[in-house]
Image: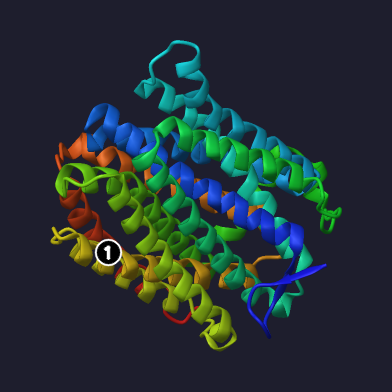
Amino acid sequence: MFLPFLPGFVSLTAPLGILFFLSSFARGLYIVVVGWAAVSLTESVAATGRVFLIGHLVLLFLGPFAGVLVDKFSHSRILFVGQALNLAAFGIPVLAPQLGAQLTIFHLYVVALLNGIGVLTMAGALERYLANSTEPEARRRAIAFAGAVNNVSLVTGIFVAGYAIHYSSITTTFAIGGVTCVLVAMLSQLLPPNHGPATSSASGSYWRSISEGMSRIVSQRSLLVLSLVTSMSFSVGQLTNALLPGFVKLDLNLESDALAILDASWACGGILCSVLLAKYILEVSSSARIACISLILLGFVTFIVSMVSILSFAAIFLFLMGFFFSSTRIVADALTLDACPAALVGRVRLNQQSLTSLFGVAMYLSPTILGAQSSQQLFSLWGLFICIFGFFLAWVARGSS
């Protein structure tokens, strides 16, 4: 059974495609509801950043170990465990009021911890499954179409969360996320077995397996540059998730429906980019410098957002941010899969996620360290830094392919 997402191009098996959709739908819900709950409870950009920081710390310390598990064990079992953790995360804010407890920032810290572990296992397992299910010559397009599906579902989750909060409550939105996790856990058991090729490192020690993934990255200049580009672009996405609630509520003085519009604008830009790259990805240059240029443009638009104070203009620039975020990620991911053997995808990708966490720690702690009182100040500082970093990586990547 096949589910073609765009005619004439790559198709994904129906259970896998629906898993990509539902997992990103839950992610969209999580981004909006946790960010809005944090800024509503504290009215602080710094406190909201610390909530999202928890998930990055999970990636930093547990990412490489999860990569080994992804390469060793059944994907359907790992997906089930990941969704069980996500269900617990969404369930805490729902059960707390029922037990007579008021939702606090401490509850959100626990939610972020559980969700971080759950998302960590989900991401590695789905990517490894996709890599093993796709022929090498079709892998670029498969990644691009998976990105398109993820962005469509992310928009859907964002809109549902924004308007559920606005017209119902934060608790109701968390409950919707919990139901989605149950569906994903059930659907993950319908995937056919797909373990990929066995490797000698899979039976070795954890540290040896972890070092293989990192050694692969540092020994190949183009893969190292791509890993840094991927990590920075993902960190920009996560930083935006943390800053937008404060940007909407504290800087623009608007409600959660405006947050849904801005988050959806970002995701729509990502969708357009995914569709375009899915059509032309085979013609994209194999040079890592293409990804670096996209990162520079992402940083430039991030800087421009800091100057915007009108919702319509903010939506336009968030759309462009989503476009360049998606182009950076898709091109870097496609080139990474070209350079990485399928048997090492789990370890390499999750080592990259740990690298992402290093950037994320700095970004999420910057409101506390710098004492910034507005999201606009942070958009300005990080946009400028990303541009400079992108130019540096483009210089390092010269001549590599």
Residue 210 on image: x %, y %:
65, 45
Between residue 266 and residue 293, name the one nearer to us. Answer: 266
Which residue is under mark 1? 315
The answer to whether residue 194 is visible is yes
- Quadrant in the picture for residue 44: top left
Q: Residue furthest front?
A: 167
Q: Nearer the viewer, residue 168 or 32?
A: 168
Task: Using residue 173 as the reference point, say whether residue 369 is left or right of it.
Answer: left
Q: How far from the left and from the top, in percent, is residue 362?
A: 32, 43
Residue 295 place in picture, x, y as percent: 36, 69
Task: Locate residue 241, reporting x and y percent.
Answer: 36, 48
Number of other residues with Cα within 10 Å of mark 1, as a class: few under 14, some 14 to 19, many 20 or more:
many
Drawn side of residue 187 relative to residue 255, left or right: right
- Give the residue at the far bottom of this rendering: 283
Q: Residue at x 54, y 58 (%)?
A: 153
The number of callouts visible is 1
Q: Quadrant of the N terminus?
A: bottom right
| Residue closest to the far top | 100
Residue at point 33%, 57% (across, down)? 261
